[in-house]
Amino acid sequence: MRFASIFVPHFAVQAALRCEPEGNANRKRPMVILDGPDSVLRVFAFNERAACRYIAVGMTRIQAEQCPGVVLCKRLVAQEQAAQFALVDCALAFSPRVESATEGAVTCEIAGTNRVFGPPKTLAQRIVQTCTEMGFEVNVAVATNPDAALVGAKGLAGITIIPSGEEQRCLSKLPIEVLSPMIDDSEILDSWGIRTCSDLVALPPIALVERLGQEGLRLHTLARGAVQRKLLTLDPPNKFEEHLELEDSVTDLESLAFLLNRLLHQVAARLTARGFATDEIRLCLDLEEHSDRDVRDEVEPRRSMKFERTLKSAVPIDDTKTLLKLLQLDLAAHNPGAPVRAITLEAMPAKRRSTQGGLFTPRAPEPASLEVTLARIRAVVGEMDEQGRHRVGAPQICDSHKPDDFQVVPFRADNGKPNPSRFSRDTGVALRIFRPPFTAKVRSNQGKPAHITFAECSAPIVCAAGPWFRSGLWWHETQCWSREDWDIAIRSKDGVGLYRIYHQGHHWFVEGLYD
Amino acid sequence: MPDTHAVHWLATTTGVDEIDRELGGVPVGAITELVAPRFVSAGQKSLQAKLLARATAERVCALVDATDFFDQKSAQAMGVDLRRLFWIRCSGREMKGLEQAFKCADLLLQASGGFGVIVVDLAGLAPRLVRKVPLTTWFRFRAVIEKQDTALIFATSYPVTSTCSELVLTLSTQDVRWSKTSDNCPTHATVFAGFEFQAEIIRKRSCKKPVQAARYSSFTNPRLA
């Protein structure tokens, strides 16, 4: 049985960096994470470059600012949670059995993956590559037990393969801190001069238990790399959410798109690692609300309000460019209307499309680009009409006797299968229906329409057929309808016009033209 | 001598036998214009529906409806597979509808491709509006559609595409049929039975000299079918 552990050094720093648009540039700079109330912010974590500038945990913000070139950043628990989920997604790309060991570390069982991913070293390289795509710089260690792998990943940079039976030798030079001892025990061991795992292993275990209790035995076994246990596997979380808080509010859509692009890349990388695409994106923006007031007044606390948009696509999409374009078009049509302080982006996972192209299959629009075209067209014609029906999509007739009762459903390029046999040579007459119907003035003679005036037409009726009475929803107080239909023909200089007209209440309407 | 009436272009059949026999259908990768006077039953919408019925049986199609006049029930009765029809309902009977229709048609052509037939229905718009469309627009459409395997059809009330279209058909009513037993038949016993229309080929670029052919076809009211 083999286990691979992924460890993210300076996890809090990397969690903050992965969503930053300038994350890669900041990675090479000393970075410090501050935590606590705004009035007493203290250093919580920092990277190696910051350690070189004599930054230490617990320093105040002012003290940290004294160090030149240091980038200060406030800790966000939501970002760390998202980063941990992302790390789990990384591991789930290689194995279904994953344990989220501690913050910034995951362990997965890789037994039986040789045929899929190759030998452990190749697998570890692929893990590093996947983690890099998600914005993490990680250490990976492979060992025969999960704890030895975790300790190895914590203490040894890069990729480490610990052969079976050589755990003790491989871990011997690691500092005692990688075993995560309790503070009291750590101080005691330090006072004894125990600095490395090999020092600890050299101590007699019974004497160690007498002095440190069971914790001492645990540390001793860990240092030898001899802990045998089963993984505490977790149910894979299906939450693909990224959060970004901004120090300075964003006021224009272009800048917002730049930030959204970063978040989308993170979400898409996680979805890809799990073999998913998305058919629904939920965007939540925290907006800053300002009100007009006298500047001499006391400083008004900043109020915030939420702006939420849900973007649904007819097909699952995993292309970030397409998703970004859809978000941009949606935000252009629905402007947040206020500066943006924080962004939360959530993607609903959906099974990827699997289509097999055929040599003789007629070409259809590419679904992802069709979604963008749909969004562009929606921006031109609008989303809905006055009746709340979509303006773009595939028509669907409702199961009702009510005239012109239809709805418009999302159009999919793969809707239905080509069926040439469906076509029949039966002829019929198409109706050109007027929405809304034209109001008409009709003069009757002996109970039948004799002359009609509507829109640009005013002509005697040369032939009329009807009436046919229709009604529906008579049990409904407000939606009940009844009408009297007529088919009429009028002659103009251009030709004959055959109309369907109806009489409802005390009014005449022209419903459509047989054309 | 080559037969100028022979079908030598890639075409989508219309589903109307007389037109298909004469032309082989409407050209693919080119503009076709169907012209019929406004507010006249000339078979323009029925011809569109037949064409879409034929085309949706094989590929997905798009309908850019400038005036939102498309009736799904009659179209479905004529065989249109509504699930495979991408319907764009523009909002307005005036210039706004025209502008929207052209923008949408442009987007469909530029971005997606892959549609078997794209019908842009401008027939509900007044000729004075359609005449305002600059000639450069039609040339642009022609240049774009030439590279695609899509039949682009404009339904208008006035011939406007000029030399940019491969085929121009002018439609007119020939006869209206009413089902009645006698001249004194009461109106409620009379039913509109259908009509015959004439399609006149005004322009066909693949022929050296202009073709003036006239063919008749009829549509029957489905109530009597």
Image (tube, coloured by chain):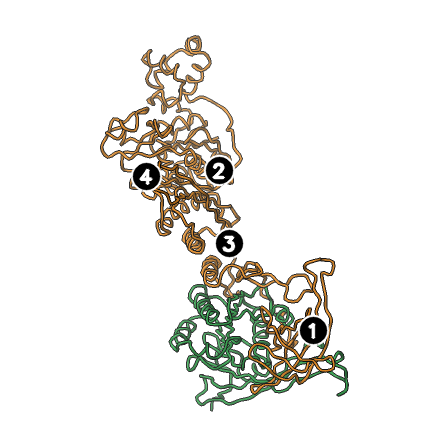
Q: Which residue is mark 3?
A: A313
Same chain check for tags 3 and 1: yes
For this rendering, which residue is in front, A427 or A125?
A: A427
Label 3 to label 1, Cα distance in Å? 41 Å
Asked whether residue B63 is in view, the answer is: yes
Residue A239 is left or right of residue B77, and the answer is left
Label 2 and label 3 in one chain:
yes
* Viewer-side label of 3, 4: 4
Looking at the image, tell me whether mark 2 or mark 3 is earlier in sequence order: 2
The reply to whether residue B116 is visible in this rendering is no
* Mark 4 in CB contact with mark 2 (< 8 angstroms): no
Q: Is residue A447 left or right of residue A138?
A: right
Say which residue label 4 marks: A296
Q: Is residue A21 above or below residue A72?
A: below
Badge 3 crowding class, 10 Å Cα cut-off, few under 14, some 14 to 19, many 20 or more, is: many
Q: Chain of mark 4?
A: A
* Residue depicted at x 73% and y 79%: A447
Quadrant, the C terminus of chain A: bottom right
**Whole-number angstrom distance, CA of label 3 to CA of label 4:** 49 Å
Q: Is residue A236 above or below residue B104?
A: above
Identify residue type, mark 1.
Asp
Helix, strand or loop under label 4: loop
**Callout 3: residue from which chain?**
A
For marks 1 and 2 on the same chain, the one whose residue lies earlier in the sequence = 2
Q: Nearer the viewer, residue A288 or A312?
A: A288
Check contact, mark 3 vs mark 4: CB within 8 A: no
**Residue found at the far left of this picture:** A68
Label disc, if present, on residue A477 of the rendered structure:
none
The colour chain B appears in is: green
Look at mark 1 in the image and give the residue it sits on: A485
